[in-house]
Amino acid sequence: MAPQIPTGTGRLGERIGLGDVFVSWRVDELIPGRLRDRARPPEIGRVVDVSISGAAIVAPTSPQLRRGRPVCIRLDDADAVVRIRRIEEIGDDDWRLYGVEFVETDLAFRDWVNGLLDARRPDSQTLGWDRAD
């Protein structure tokens, strides 16, 4: 049975559904006062959709991933800090849907999101937005 991924949430902006886009994320990079001898390997999540303000990511269930927690995510060489705003069950006890808000993004990550949004915008030439008549 395929997981049932909820779509009715209050994220700002248009949501762009994605295919197989995977991010890695690590909670322990952002826990204040926590020192680790060795970094834990990152978890892998699949980005279900993205908007200008956030994303929906399906990832393994973890007690460290809770509402309000900041998390570092990485997409190829692009990095962002997100805050978990919601966690929803998707029909599989080992996986959850994490609704995240972008807190801080590097230029490469921002370019990736903006590129997705630009691809969805109508061509200004075909709509006549480039002329006054």
Image (cartoon, rainbow, N blue to C red):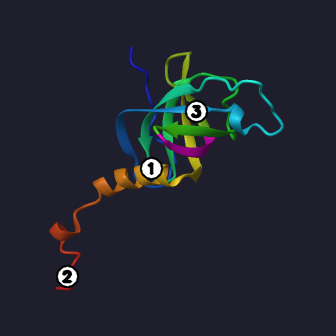
Q: What residue type is labelled 2?
A: Arg
Dividing the picture into quarters, in which one does residue 85 lie? top right
Q: Is mark 3 on a helix, strand or loop?
A: strand
User: Which label is found at residue 25?
Assistant: 3
Counting residues from the start of the chain, the first of labels 1 and 3 encountered is 3
- Residue 119, magenta (yes or no): no
Residue range highlighted in magenta: 77-85
63 horizontally vs 44: left or right = right
Q: What element carries label 1?
A: loop
* Residue at the spot of label 2: 131
- The residues tagged by marks 1 and 3 sit, at their Cα atoms, a distance apart of 19 Å
Q: Are dots 2 and 1 in contact, CB under 8 Å?
A: no
* Residue at the spot of label 1: 51
Q: Which amino acid does label 1 sit on?
A: Ser
Residue 68 screen position, x and y as percent: 69, 41
72 versus 124 height, above or below: above
Q: What residue type is labelled 3?
A: Trp
